[in-house]
Amino acid sequence: MFWNRYKKSRTSVIRGQVVGPTGSGIVGVRVGIDPSSKAGSILTQESG
């Protein structure tokens, strides 16, 4: 399982917001580092 191999020293936090032309958040945008890596990704919520 992934959490068994979790290393705090190799962890980063990326914060931001994905917004449209009107400035409102866009739901469901996949955000990640590199699609070919195993770093993972996340989908944006209502606030973008």
Image (cartoon, rainbow, N blue to C red):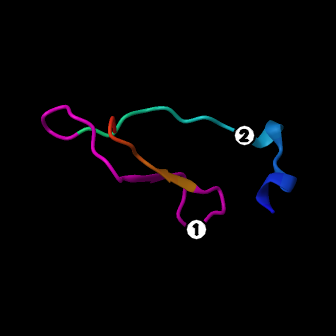
Distance (Cα) linking label 2 and label 1: 18 Å
Instruction: Answer with left or right where residue 1 lies relative to residue 41.
Output: right
Residue 42 placed where, x, y %? 50, 51
Q: Which residue is at a point 13% across and 34% down the rendered structure image?
A: 22
Q: Which residue is at a point 54% across and 58% down the rendered structure image?
A: 34
Determine which quarter of the picture holds residue 24.
top left
Q: Is residue 14 magenta?
A: no
Q: Relative to the observer, which residue lies in front, 32 or 46?
A: 46
In magenta, the rendered stretch is 20-40
Q: Which residue is at a point 61% across and 34% down the rendered structure image?
A: 13
> Which corner quadrant holds the C terminus?
top left
Residue 31 placed where, x, y %? 45, 50
Where 27 sits versus 19, above or below? below
Q: Relative to the observer, which residue lies in front, 29 or 38?
A: 29
Q: Are marks 2 and 1 in contact (CB under 8 Å)?
A: no
Q: Main secondary structure of the magenta part?
A: loop
Instruction: Answer with left or right where residue 19 lies relative to residue 45.
Output: left
Q: Residue lying at the far left in this picture: please name it.
A: 22
Instruction: Answer with left or right where residue 22 lies relative to residue 48.
Output: left
Determine which quarter of the picture holds residue 23.
top left
Q: Residue lying at the far bottom in this picture: please name it.
A: 36
Q: Residue lying at the far front in this picture: please name it.
A: 46
For label 2, count other residues whose C-alpha is less than 10 Å away and answer few (under 14), some (14-19) or many (20+).
few
Q: Amino acid at mark 2?
A: Thr
- Reading the image, the residue beneath label 1 is 36
For label 1, count other residues whose C-alpha is less than 10 Å away and answer few (under 14), some (14-19) or many (20+).
few
- Give the structural element (helix, strand or loop) at label 2: loop
Q: Amino acid at mark 1?
A: Ser
- Reading the image, the residue beneath label 2 is 11
Residue 20 placed where, x, y %? 20, 41
Q: Relative to the observer, which residue lies in front, 41 or 10?
A: 41
Q: Which residue is at a point 42% across and 33% down the rendered structure image?
A: 16
